[in-house]
Image (spheres, rainbow, N blue to C red):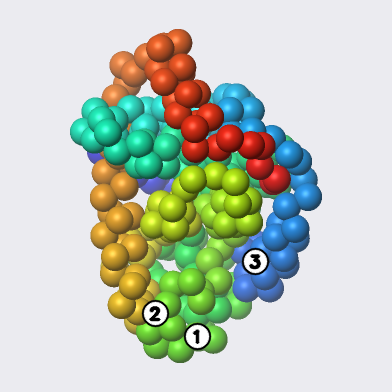
Amino acid sequence: MLRKFKEDTKQERLYYDMYKNQTYDYVINQNKKYSILNNAKLSINEILNIMDKFVDPSDPDLDKSNSIHAYQTAEKIREKYPYDYDLQIIGLIHDIGKILFIFGEPPWAIVGDTFVLGCRIPKSVVYYNSLKYIIEQHPDYNNSILGVYKEKCGLDKLVLSFGHDEYLYQVLKQNKTHKIKEKYMNIIRYHSFYPWHTMGEYRQFMNKSDYKKLEDVLMFNQFDLYSKEDKDFVLTDKIKKYYKDLLNLYFPKDLQW
């Protein structure tokens, strides 16, 4: 069974830190800090190589470097959609925003399920029961379901907990030399937003266009999540070359990070 979160684990400790530190003001400041993209200039292939050194401490299903998960996801997509190169690329790069770890960010500011700040935290978030004592201290604990937002304002108006999703979305949004379409950038932006796309929360904020985003993210999630079941996956030089060539096509120049 995937996404089975147990108590007294590194995952629970990470979410403790997340619920303690991820506040509306913190996220606003982090988004401002990383909107400048003045940290490094690197190619996607360089980023993938760096991801060999990162193991996601929030993931109860995978204890391998994040680069392995990247290729696993892309290969699952290629197996079903051999000519959907856009989707394959998104499968490969969707997590590389976790490069935040080389900029000194703590794990709770990089990974984990995202949730909305500025409104009530739903009871369906990971570890809500076991960590309720820390959630009760959060500024949004007694907030309303709308909080600082308006009904049907749209997902793009929400302030989500800071992490690799929004960071990579902003990198792609601001670097204009790649060939990634907005549809796929939105998949990246919301793929960790499990309270929304899987638990059915935050529907009060969705506008008409957000329902297509939900459909796209749920489609992608079947590859992102269930590719982890393939314990026998072997990353070969042939697979690496296939994606290196594809990345060179989609990303002809280095990106500003």
Q: Are marks 2 and 3 in contact (CB under 8 Å)?
A: no
Alpha-carbon span between mark 1 and mark 3: 16 Å
Measuring 30% from the left and 38% from the top, which residue is drawn there?
Answer: 84
Left or right for 158, reference 162: left
Measuring 34% from the left and 70% from the top, which residue is drawn there?
Answer: 210
Measuring 69% from the left and 46% from the top, which residue is drawn there?
Answer: 257
Q: Secondary structure at mark 2?
A: helix
Q: Which mark is residue 27?
A: 3
- Residue 139, how many percent across, how many down? 60, 77
Q: Secondary structure at mark 3?
A: helix
- Dividing the picture into quarters, in which one does residue 71 lie? top left
Amino acid at the residue labelled 2? Phe
Most distant residue in the right direction: 38
- Viewport quadrant of the N terminus: top left
Amino acid at the residue labelled 3? Val
Q: Nearer the viewer, residue 23 or 250?
A: 250
Q: Nearer the viewer, mark 2 or mark 3?
A: 2
Task: Give above or below for 51 relative to 120.
Answer: above
Q: Nearer the viewer, residue 115 or 41?
A: 41
Which numbered disc flags the more N-terminal residue, 1 or 2? 1
Q: Mark 3: few, some, or many residues within 10 Å (few <14, many ≥20)? A: some
- Dividing the picture into quarters, in which one does residue 45 lie? top right
Q: Which mark is residue 205?
A: 2
- Residue 249, how many percent across, how many down? 49, 32
Amino acid at the residue labelled 1? Tyr
Most distant residue in the left direction: 80
Left or right for 168, reference 239: right
Q: Are marks 1 and 3 in contact (CB under 8 Å)?
A: no
Give the residue pinned by disc 1. Answer: 149
Q: Which mark is residue 48?
A: none
Q: Is residue 136 visible?
A: no
Q: Are marks 1 and 2 in contact (CB under 8 Å)?
A: yes
